[in-house]
Amino acid sequence: MAESLGVKQPSVLKIEHQTDLYLFTLRHFVAAAGGTLELRVELPGMGALTLTGVREIGAAKSGG
């Protein structure tokens, strides 16, 4: 995992034990394991949205 992320093993251990992660960090960690990260958000009156980036929330709320 550390090699895939381009970091040292202690950094991987730190990521594994964090209770709050940036989505950017989590996305890279999941990608290094061969997976993809998907964030599902439900907003009132809009139903479920699947986001690839947080800025999409603002676009969805403004209709664009």
Image (cartoon, rainbow, N blue to C red):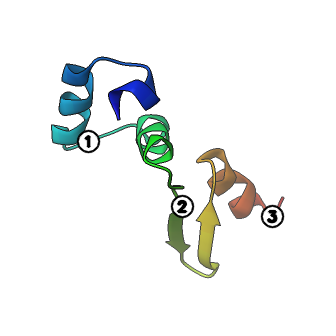
Q: Secondary structure at mark 1?
A: loop
Query: Eyeballing the image, is 8 above or below 44?
Result: above
Q: Would you call the spot at circle 1 few (<14 residues within 10 Å), some (14-19), or many (20 or more)? A: few
Label 3 and label 2: CA atoms lie apart by 21 Å
Three-letter amino acid code of the residue under disc 3: Gly
Viewer-proximal residue among 39 and 43: 39
Viewer-proximal residue among 57 and 24: 24
Viewer-proximal residue among 19 and 44: 19
| Residue lying furthest front | 3
The residue identified by callout 2 is 38
Query: Eyeballing the image, is 28 above or below 50?
Result: above
Foreground mark, 1 or 3, reads 1
| Left or right placement of residue 39 versus residue 1 in this view | right
Three-letter amino acid code of the residue under disc 2: Glu
CB atoms at circles 3 and 2 under 8 Å apart? Answer: no
The residue identified by callout 1 is 20
Q: Would you call the spot at circle 2 few (<14 residues within 10 Å), some (14-19), or many (20 or more)? A: few
Which residue is at a point 26% across and 34% down the rendered structure image?
15
CB atoms at circles 1 and 2 under 8 Å apart? Answer: no
Give the mark, 3 or 2, whose residue is nearer the N terminus. 2
Give the mark, 1 or 3, whose residue is nearer the N terminus. 1
Which residue is at a point 63% across and 53% down the rendered structure image?
52
Image quadrant in which you'd find residue 16: top left
Q: Position of residue 44 (x, y in %)?
A: 54, 78
Label 1 and label 2: CA atoms lie apart by 17 Å
Image quadrant in which you'd find residue 9: top left
Label 1 and label 3: CA atoms lie apart by 30 Å
Which residue is at a point 32% across and 39% down the rendered structure image?
21
Q: Position of residue 62 (x, y in %)?
A: 76, 59
The residue identified by callout 3 is 63
CB atoms at circles 1 and 3 under 8 Å apart? Answer: no
